């Protein structure tokens, strides 16, 4: 049986798509193996190009796979391949084939043709592949429900790499999640290039959430990031109504300065953003709040950065994703003047990351004495680890703990941003 290994770089949507690819290859008669297996006939790097570092990492994995498996067919697929193909960039001698966005759903057929194998299997591009979640191997299902982004933020290359805007039929998603739940799935994560733009006829993301939350004995539901100015207020209201939806909201802010937001091409002001956070805090008790921030956007002055710091200090964030600005060829920001020195970017990233760690630690301390629900991802010698619904890492001790178990208990302690549940007996 021909063996195939996958390496995924980048976002949860890439991870969700890789799960679908794996299911499609199994259906086509391939055997999916780990990248460090002794023998591997095909290696597929599902790459990312949202930053220069992610693009370099994608190609680094290709070279690593070539060293580990010299005779294997090496393919790079997804955003990094699309960027190389569109920009006519040099790839690397380690790569045998680049598979862009339009063709990645034909990966099994492309590989079969390259190896002269008797199969023409393809991956359906508009249906959820239920076997993308496999009990015992993963603790949650990453479910891609939408692709493409109509926003044109000055720094972002994603709209160029994922130009086709699509949404999966809500009835198909609900049916697939119901089957996943029957198979033992305890959590699904909804993902998309711009999740708030999900739109299936008269159903948008709020209606989809209602339908998923109504599945009897269904899994808990977690959302990946939602762009401010889409459907976030309606989503917050649904979170307040349902205990099946994890109380964690990730709203990318990118900057706390209005002038920088205008240069970025964002669709809101700092006041607008603060209003959304205030709305969430009024409607949701004990909610986890995450955000993305770009440090060192072209022309970002010390005053503009300090404005961002003040906003971060003022808002009750519990999780910060901080990135140094990375110029992406073909985006308006790539040609902007007054770039911030790399050393200044690094210092700003370091400063904001320290703020984020302190805020997460404070939020974790606030959980002591509160009830939480933890999905266990690993269990060893009576100690389990996983994540709360509010997206805090958790350590659970007790008898008869198992992977993929939802543990409901009271937090007894916290340590450096992690919550602890001691002596829990299911």
Image (cartoon, helix red, strand yellow):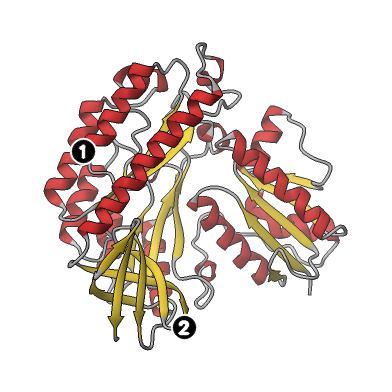
Q: Is residue 48 left or right of residue 35?
A: left
Q: Is residue 161 left or right of residue 58?
A: left
**Residue 369, picture quadrant:** bottom left
Lateral position of residue 245 relative to residue 115, left or right: left
From this viewpoint, is residue 365 visible? yes
Q: Whole-percent x and y of residue 331?
A: 54, 23
User: Quick one: which residue is furthest to the left in this view?
Assistant: 282
- Above or below for 89 versus 411: above
Instruction: Tell me the distance, in whole angstroms, between the alpha carbons under discs 2 and 1.
Output: 43 Å
Instruction: Report the residue marked by disc 1.
Output: 276
First of labels 2, 1 by sequence position: 1
For this rendering, which residue is in front, 203 or 277?
277
**Label 1 neighbour load within 10 Å: few <14, some 14-19, many 20+:** some
Front residue of 50/393: it is 393
For residue 250, above or below residue 155: below
Left or right? Give the position of 188 relative to 83.
left
Residue 291: tell me if it is visible.
Answer: no
Residue at (56, 20) in percent of width and height: 334
Badge 2 marks a residue whose secondary structure is loop
- The residue shown at (35%, 79%) is 397
């Amino acid at each position: 049986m021909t063996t195939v290994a996958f390496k995924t770089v980048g976002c949860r949507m890439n991870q969700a798509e890789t799960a679908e690819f794996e299911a499609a290859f199994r259906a086509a008669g391939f055997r999916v193996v780990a990248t460090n297996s002794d023998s591997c006939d095909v290696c597929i790097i599902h790459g990312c190009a949202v930053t220069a570092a992610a693009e370099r990492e994608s190609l680094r994995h290709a070279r690593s796979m070539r060293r580990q498996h010299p005779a294997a067919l090496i393919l790079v697929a997804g955003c990094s391949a699309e960027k190389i193909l569109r920009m006519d960039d040099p790839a690397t001698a380690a790569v045998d084939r680049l598979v862009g966005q339009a063709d990645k759903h034909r990966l099994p057929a492309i590989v079969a043709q390259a190896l002269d194998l008797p199969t023409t299997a393809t991956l359906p591009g508009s249906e959820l592949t239920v076997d993308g979640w496999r009990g015992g191997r993963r603790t949650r299902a990453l479910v891609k429900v939408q692709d493409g982004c109509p926003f044109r933020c000055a720094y972002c290359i994603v709209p160029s790499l994922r130009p086709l805007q699509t949404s999966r039929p809500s009835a198909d998603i609900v049916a697939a999640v119901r089957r996943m739940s029957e198979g033992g799935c305890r959590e699904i994560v909804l993902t998309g290039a711009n999740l708030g733009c999900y739109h299936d006829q008269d159903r948008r993301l709020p209606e989809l959430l209602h339908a998923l939350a109504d599945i009897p004995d269904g899994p808990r539901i977690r959302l990946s990031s939602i762009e401010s100015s889409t459907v976030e207020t309606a989503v917050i209201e649904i979170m307040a109504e349902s205990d099946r939806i994890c109380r964690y909201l990730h709203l990318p802010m990118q900057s706390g300065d209005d002038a920088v937001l205008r240069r970025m091409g964002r669709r809101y002001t700092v006041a607008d953003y603060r209003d959304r956070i205030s709305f969430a805090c009024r409607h949701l008790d004990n909610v986890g709040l995450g955000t993305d921030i770009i440090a060192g956007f072209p022309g970002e002055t010390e005053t503009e950065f300090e404005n961002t710091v003040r906003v971060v200090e003022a808002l009750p964030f519990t999780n910060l994703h901080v990135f140094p600005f990375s110029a992406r060829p073909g985006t308006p920001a790539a040609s902007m003047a007054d770039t911030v020195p790399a050393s200044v970017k690094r210092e700003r990233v370091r400063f904001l990351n320290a703020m984020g760690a302190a805020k997460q630690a404070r939020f974790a301390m606030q959980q002591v004495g509160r009830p939480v629900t933890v999905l266990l991802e690993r269990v060893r010698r009576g100690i389990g680890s996983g994540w709360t619904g509010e997206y805090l890492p958790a350590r659970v001790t007790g008898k008869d703990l198992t992977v993929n178990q939802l543990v409901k208990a009271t937090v007894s302690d916290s340590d450096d941003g992690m919550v602890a549940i001691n002596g829990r007996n299911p």
